[in-house]
Structures are given as C-alpha cells and as structure tokens.
Amino acid sequence: MTAIDDLPPLRDVIREHGLSARKSLGQNFLLDLNLTARIARSAGPLEDATIIEVGPGPGGLTRALLALGARRVIAVERDERALGPLQAIAKRYPGRLEIVLADAQRFDPRPMLSGEQAKIVANLPYNIATALLVDWLSIEPWPPWYDMMVLMFQREVAERIVARENDEAYGRLAVLANWRAETKILFDISPAAFVPQPKVTSSVVRLTPRGAPEPCERRALEQVAAAAAVDATRRAETIPVSGFVAMARELTDIRNTKLNGSRGEI
C-alpha cells in the first residue's frame, strides 16, 4: 500500500481509538488508501474544490481528498468515536478540514457554503445511502448546490441508479436519478477491501447534475414512476425517462384543471 501522507496506517488509527465498525450505523471501513485515492481522483481536479464527505469514519477518504489537494473538506459524521482520528487529520492539514458532528439526513450544508458550489464525495453508510441520494436528487430549486456526486453503494443499488429502460434494475430510483443527473458506475470494490467485510460487492457511482432536466413537477414524476402497470399495453420498465416525464406533466395538468374547475364552481 502506497502512503499518501505521514499519518499512521488506518488499522492503527482504528485500534488506538477503539473505532470498531458498528452495524447499526451501516459502517464498513475502507482501509486501502490506494482505493480511497482512486475514489477521490474520480471527482476530478480537487485543487479549488469544496468537498462534502458523509460518514468519514477513521478518515481514509478524508486523507485522500486532502492529500490530493482539496481546498476544503466538510466531513459530516454522527459517530463521536471518529472525532479523535478526524481531529488528527485536521491538525495535519490546518485550515482545510471542518468536522461536523451531525446526522447527514438532517444536515444542510448550504449555510457553510456561502453560495459556492461543492462536490459530494463519500463512502456512504449502507443503511442510509439510498435515502441520502434521493434527498440530494430532490433538492429544490434545481440545479443544486453541488456540481458532482461521487458515491459508493452496494452494487445492487448502483445498478438501480444507472439503469435504463429495458434493464432489469430499472425503476423509480433510476427514473429520478437519470432525470436529474447523468449517471455512471466507475468501478467496483471487492468486499475484501473493507473491515468488516460486507457480503456484497460495492460500486463507485458518479452523478453529474443536469443543468436543465426536462421540465415537470418532481413529486408528480415520483408518483408516476412509483406506480405499477402505468400502461396496460406497455410494461413500466420499457418506458424511458422522457416517457415518465410526459406522464408527470399530464398528471399535473389534470390536477391543475380539476383544481381550477373546483375554484370556478365556488
């Protein structure tokens, strides 16, 4: 393993701080610094970037982001045991790492960004990964405060994110993700790279927000995409994102017509 800085190996950090992974927090620590550096590089040039990282744990990805030049990393962690390792990293990279002890599902980074764009780069805790992604894809107004997401998911979830019509994994998540972003699986990571080892392969996914998605109401799109057998003569998995968008517009028009008609009768 190639050293990326002069901080101790992650296994030593975990041992020193008693930072054993907790299933209740969805923790699986990635200890290979070559892999964390590969994830960091996938977010593109980092020299002028502000990074939001969720679930840094012992800080393997945090160290890679900083070593590769990220100007500012905001690390959001709910496990107080990780504060010691993260504070050591902050000392090694003065003025560039900000640690936020918070639940990522309730954390809004915008007050800390002061209008600047950020990138989200994270080895997401498995138990909240999909919920966080849906939250980030549901931000209003659009475009969002981030210009890229590089995120790790279980392979099955990654396939659901990038799926296109006629793919077996195509469904509600794919419709939302590909309506609002360009999506791509970059590479897989073996279970053997983690402590403890998960039972499944992980995948790193890049999502780049579309500046102008096809216009429709997001909630209507989600409702249409969630419905089964949307057309009796056509299977839902064969309908492209543009088809769901068209149906969402129609649903919105119907609702508005009914609403305006009701008001006219009063």
Image: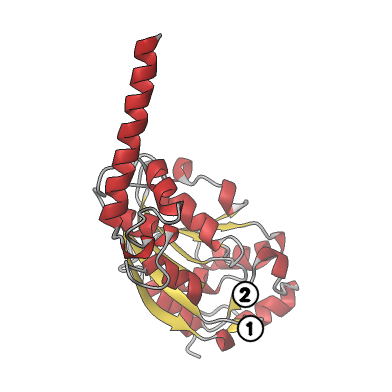
Image coordinates of residue 243 in percent, x first then y, are 27, 54
CB under 8 Å between callouts 1 and 2? yes
User: 107 or 8, which is in the foreground?
Assistant: 107
Query: Label 1 to label 2, Cα distance in Å?
Result: 7 Å
Residue 124: name its quadrant.
bottom right
- Left or right, 143 with reference to 133: left
Amino acid type, callout 1? Gln
Farthest residue, direction bottom: 1
In the figure, 225 relative to 198: above or below?
above
In the figure, 30 relative to 89: above or below?
below
Determine crowd level at label 1: few under 14, some 14-19, many 20+ residues with C-alpha closer than 10 A: some
Image coordinates of residue 71 in percent, x first then y, are 39, 60
Q: Residue, x 34% and y 36% (percent of image)?
A: 252
Determine crowd level at label 2: few under 14, some 14-19, many 20+ residues with C-alpha closer than 10 A: many
Image coordinates of residue 74 in percent, x first then y, are 50, 56
Image quarter in which the C terminus is found: top left
Element class at badge 1? loop
Which residue does the numbered mark 2 point to in the structure image? 28
Image coordinates of residue 145 in percent, x first then y, are 37, 47
Element class at badge 2? loop
- Left or right, 134 with reference to 83: left
Residue 67 can be seen, yes or no: no
Residue 29: name its quadrant.
bottom right
Farthest residue, direction front: 233
User: 94 or 123, which is in the foreground?
Assistant: 123
Q: Residue, x 51% and y 44% (percent of image)?
A: 108
Amino acid type, callout 2? Asn
User: 164 or 18, which is in the foreground?
Assistant: 164
Which residue does the numbered mark 1 point to in the structure image? 197
Display colour scheme: secondary structure
